[in-house]
Image (cartoon, coloured by chain):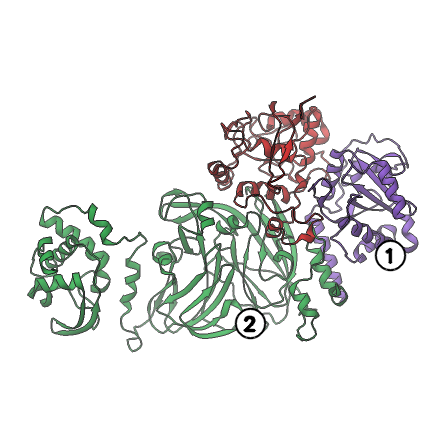
Amino acid sequence: MKKSLRMSGLLVALILAAAGCSRDEADSGGHQHHEHMQMAASEAPGGQSVYQLQSLWNSQRGETVRLQSLTGKPVVLAMVYTHCDHACPRIIGDMRLIRQALDAHASDVHFVLVSIDPERDTVERLQAFGEETGLSRQGWTLLRGDEVDVRELAAVFGVQYRRTSATDFAHSNVINVLDRGGEVIHQQQGLGSRPDATVRALKSVLGE
Amino acid sequence: MLAVTAGSYVPLYGDKTRPVGVDAFYMDEYPVTNEEYLAFVNDHPRWRRSKVAPLFADEGYLAHWQADLVAGEQAPEKAPVTNVSWFAAKAYCEAGGKRLPTLDEWEYAARASEDNRDAASRPGFNRLILDWYGKPTRLPLPEVGYSFRNAWGLWDMHGLVWEWVMDFNAVVMTGESRKDAGGLDPQLFCAAGALGTVDPADYAAFMRYAMRGSVQARYSVQNMGFRCARDIEGAAP
Amino acid sequence: MSAHKLFPGLVATVLAMMALVACQPSGSGKTEQAESQESGWSPPVATDIQGEETAVLTPPPQVPSPIDRDHPTKLVVHLEVQEKVMQMADGVDYTFWTFGGTVPGSFIRVRRGDLIEFHLANRADSKVPHNIDLHAVTGPGGGAVSSFTPPGKETVFSFQALNPGLYIYHCATAPVGMHIANGMYGLILVEPEEGLPPVDREFYVVQGDFYTRGGYGDAGLQPFDMEKALKEQPDYVVFNGSVNALTGDRALHAKKGETVRIYVGNGGPNLVSSFHVIGEIFDTVYIEGGTALNHNIQTTLVPAGGAAIVDFRIDVPGELILVDHSIFRAFNKGALGKIEVQGDEESFIYSGEQRQTVYLAEGGAVQQMPEDEVPVEQPVLTKQERIARGENVYKSNCAACHMPDGSGVPNAFPPVAESDYLNADVDRAIRAVGKGLDGEITVNGETYNNVMPRLNLSHQEIANVLSYVYSQWNNNGTEVTPEMVDKALQ
């Protein structure tokens, strides 16, 4: 059993490499005029870092932030929408599982949801959702942004989504893990997956 | 840029009874050329081949160019620029106060034949497009203004290169097209049932959707270029 | 799903292979089977994988050497998708989409239990994205989900070969039918641990149907015809990607007394093949490429997207002809191949090897019933012209049995050269051609008891062919006219 588990880890690594998510360090894009919005951003993001994106986001707490403000802690991030009644609750459930598995380290990790439905997911809606679900109390960050910026963030994560009706979206089910500098180091694909590999990835960042 | 007037169409993965409305918009007459893109990287160093961040473009970015600021023999001035990532294409358009066209805008505008704004259901039209798919890519690519000018006045919507669109990743595809097309596995999607394609014989459209579904935003593809679009201010709905 | 609890490793592997989208860890068929205690079957997830090798792939009709390993290994397979123009028939080109530059694609040979690390590359000059569905894979889409590759990229995925057998692989990118119709298929053999019984020669043959804008034989670069494909009306049905891929200089070769194994596949996209080798009986057929064996088989069905392994010992020299026995496909659409067998004749087993030329003589042209031809038939003016036309009729209708030189075949087909039978009675000769012959006749002192079928020839043609025969090979030079034929056949 152990052997095959290791094998699957190898596979994940291979797939990630194929998907262009490898950790190769490279020189940055050279556009480091970031502003300090919320939490202090320590240094310029690397060439693979998602924090190179300059888009602005509204949180459920009413702040306006750049993703770079997440710098410093590993991040578990998924793209969902709050009116979704099937897959998204399961993604959030899977994220809760990850959080539980982290035990005492849970507070050392940012848990972030980004809406793919910014039209309906207003700050007010996100705030209400965060309270109803108890996510806000646990320190989760719920973000909304301009449609183009949502598209771009999805492009970075390789997330595909499409509005299929007035109320619904089809979308990939992916939970992304970012390291302290904002590089994608792991992607948990699908629903109801065991969190083991994701937790391992997080613990490796946390230095366990 | 040329104006494309408002209208509606039924996308490949759509519902025949609910056509998708498209507002009027402007679109570039030709795909962006190497010459135009060279001017852009001159002004925006972060998009030069040697400078671009790996998050935004893979190692194939402008690979057929001779150097950072020299397009060279494999990339004739008037030929469409290819080997550009989605991020790069988006940045180019934004630098000019434009944007990438949406998938709906592109598909809507691309339904026009030389003399008819909606020729997509005509068998001869699809055949023309399929013939292009059936021929190997000729390199270096020919100059823009190569295949045909459609009823909107747009050149080369088919028959020269693939083109990026803003929401290329709206194609929710696994690459397992039997699943994707037939919706055999409704669990794959939240909104099951909306997946039946409009016309299984519309092979030409299948190819475009497959292409979009196969790429990542940082990919640079040898026969994939782009053109820009822009809103029409105060356009009637 | 309880599959999780039982086989977390396997399920995780399957999930890891789903590169883009996956909601449910849709347990593969095998995993579910494994759950059932009743079946007593457990997935042979090998734990003794040793070493690493790069697979040697071969183009058709070659087959990689049998595997002599006694353990599973990590096997690295590199396969490159190429879109390229190749010949479909003489003067006819087609843009084939290929796995490895050939149709069918490269043959892949692995051992049961091997962990295959599959690298699928799509050349930068390709027009479209591709992927691969290997029927040997237990997992979503047979690998298609994990191998969706745009031009200029390479994807990697892994799978374990759980089930022995011969499997088709093919592209499953939208539109699937078109990718397959353009030639994107091949075979992967998963050898059982103990290997297959050794044979002297192994060949790789895959049938496919093709749909072109023009009809059979229309020259030039022919584009794919979607309408014909939808109607399942192919212009070409061929072995190994083209008419003549296995004939002429490219015929297969074997020697008398050897055992031959053909790995037969059918890429489709539409037709089911009735695979037959004219002049042979399959001693053993691995039905549909699986483990069930059947013996003494004349024709075996190879479904689209399926395969079969046929073994036979060659006892007689000559030519063996591979056909799809849905026979118009063989003689009018290209589904013909040839094995040339060298060795001494074995008349005890078989004495009339010329017979197979009957089939080759037909050619690929559409044959019409004589009634249709009558209106276009031009009257003949001179005897020379009649003889010249008769020669063509002879070559296409008579030479196969009576031989091009009129000498016939001993004990089977009487000679028409220096024939006392013909020279003695013109009307009898006309009736033989026009109405057929049945029963014993004596020609030049030899007795023949066989059937000559009535030939569908016009009276004009009968006159021409007999005039030709009478003018040749020391016959008496009689000119036969249509009027004589009319009279004799009244």
Residue C25 location (% of width, % of height): 71, 58
Residue C285 location (% of width, % of height): 47, 71
| Image mark 1: chain | A
Chain B: what color?
red
Where B234 falls versus A179 (above or below)?
Answer: above
Locate residue C465: give its quadrant. bottom left
Where C316 falls versus C368 (above or below)?
Answer: below
Q: Looking at the rendering, in which quadrant would you find the C terminus of chain C?
A: bottom left
Q: Looking at the rendering, in which quadrant would you find the N terminus of chain C?
A: bottom right
In the image, taking residue B132 as reference, residue A199 lies left or right, namely right
Q: What kind of element bears circle 2?
A: loop
Locate residue C411: give its quadrant. bottom left
Where C366 falls versus C114 (above or below)?
Answer: above
User: Mark 1 or 2, which is nearer the eye?
Assistant: 1
In the image, taking residue C374 as reference, residue B104 lies left or right, namely right
Tell which residue pokes out farthest to the front in this image.
Answer: B17
Q: Which chain is purple?
A: A
| Residue at the image point whose x is 17% and y is 54% from the top | C461
Closer to the camera in the image, B141 or C450? C450
Q: Which mark is residue C195?
A: 2
Residue C357 location (% of width, % of height): 28, 62
Chain C: what color?
green
Residue C103 location (% of width, % of height): 47, 53
Closer to the camera in the image, B195 or C201? B195
Amino acid type, mark 1: Ala
| Image mark 2: chain | C
Pointer 1 residue:
A101
| Residue at the image point whose x is 52% and y is 67% from the top | C289
